[in-house]
Structures are given as structure tokens and as C-alpha cells.
Amino acid sequence: MNKYPSIPDIRHANLRRIMQEREITPAELSRILNKSPGQVGQFAGPTRHKGIGDDPAREIEELLGLSPYELDNPGSLLAKPGAVGEEPGAYFTDATFQAYTRGKIPVVGVTAAGAAMEVIDLYQPGVADEWIDAPKNYTPGSFILRLTGFSMQPRFWSEDRVLIEPALEWNPGDYVFAKRPASGDGTFKKLVEEDGRLFLYALNPEFSPRYIELTPDWQIVGKATFRLDKL
């Protein structure tokens, strides 16, 4: 008889997959869900000690910006008979499947995104330049930033578009969009740390200033997690 995964198994495997795809640490997930690390570890750790109930599953989907009942989708969790390393009829607990959220997400320029306003304002009529299908699963408040200038060449070019996710934790080494509320300007740079101080770093050696210290008058809006490459 084939061994089929239970709903708790499916939800656990899907949540682990999403955490891996988005590089969400257990600590980040705890913050997003407003739960203690111990609670999150019970149902989101490598080994499941507690199942995710119906109501918590819907709450997690909402907070992570997933489609309704996406955690319940078995997708390709069922293994093919004779799969390497698996008994016939077993299932993969860390398998992936292509089930992206296809909601619309706003595209804004650096000037609009850098204005002194809350991120939620990007969703108000008239603010976004356009709306496109989301390129991947994304967290609430995310938006597509259309880049300008040459400060991040050769990795990023003017008119490139990147997905900015304000709900995710950022760290040195991430590419981030930062704004200065007092003046309303914003910039897309790599976040680096030197001697315990954080800087916004331009990749292009010909750009000046190449380093901008992240002083209290700067605010990191979110980190980039995806680039929409041009055809």
C-alpha cells in the first residue's frame, strides 16, 4: 500500500520549502508570526513535533503572502516509485513544487519609493507606475523597484527591476533599498559592515560617493530577493 503524506506532513514540508526558498531563518519566522522561537520550532523545525492546525495554517499563509490553502497543496511531495534513496510509495518531506502566488504587485521608481511615506502607500491608486504578476511568493508589503543610474553596475543596470521585501530581515551582504525620510530620496545599494558600522555600498568603482554610512537619518525599507531579468 502506498504511503501518502498526512495534512500535517504536507503543511510542514511546504513551510520548510518556503523558508528555504526565501532564506527565512527560524528567528525571522518567529518575528513574522509573532510567536516565540520555541513555538515555531515545534511545527517549523527540521523534525516536526507539532502539526499546523487549520486556523494557524490560514494565518501563516496570510502573513507570508501565500495563496489560500497553499500550505495544503501536496504538489510533488509524493515520490515516484523507485526514487533514489526512498522506498516505493514514500514521500519527500523537503520536496519542492512550482506553485507561485500570481497576484499583482506594484512597480515603482526610486523617487516614488524613496518619498517620505509608509510602504503601504505604494498600494494606493496612482502611486505605482504599473502592476505586474508577482515573480515569486512574496511577503506582505513587497513591491518591484525600477532602478536608475549606474552606481550598481556591472551587476545591476538602469531600468533593471528588483523585488523588495520589507517584511524580511536584512543583514550585511544583502542588497537593500534605503530611504532618507527627511529629504524623501532613496537609493539601492549593497549593505556592508566595517568596524561595526554599516554602509550603503556602490558596486561601481567610478561612482562617488561609493560609501554612505547608515546614520540614523537613513531607513532601510527592505532587501532585494529577486531580479526580473530583461528578455
Image (spheres, grey):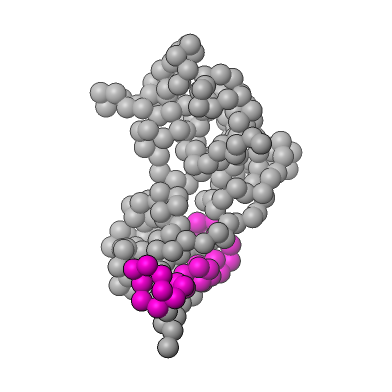
Q: Quadrant of residue 200?
A: top left
Asked if residue 122 is positioned above or below residue 204 in the image, the reply reads below
Kindly indicate the quadrant of the structure image that contains residue 173: top left
Q: Is residue 116 left or right of residue 79?
A: right
**At which x and y percent is residue 194?**
29, 23
**Which quadrant holds the C terminus?**
top right
Left or right of 38? Residue 179 is right
Residue at the left extreme of this rendering = 195
Find residue 79 and report its horizontal and vertical position in percent: 45, 72
Location of residue 217 in the rendering, given as x and y in whole percent from the top left corner: 44, 25
Q: Residue at x 36, y 72 (%)?
A: 86
Q: Residue 13 or 209: which is nearer the viewer?
A: 13
Rendered view: 100 above or below 111: below
Residue at 34%, 55% in the rendered image? 26
Residue 55 seen in the figure: no
Numbered label tally: 0
Q: Quadrant of the N terminus?
A: bottom left
Single out the residue that lies furthest toward the right: 126
Q: Is residue 168 left or right of residue 108?
A: left
Camera sees residue 122? yes
Please name the residue shown 41% across and 55% down the image.
19
Q: Residue 32 placed where, x, y %?
A: 43, 54
Magenta part of the protein: which range?
63-88
Q: Residue at x 60, y 56 (%)?
A: 101
- Main SS class of the magenta portion in the image: loop
Tell whether position 16 is magenta.
Answer: no
Magenta run includes residue 87: yes
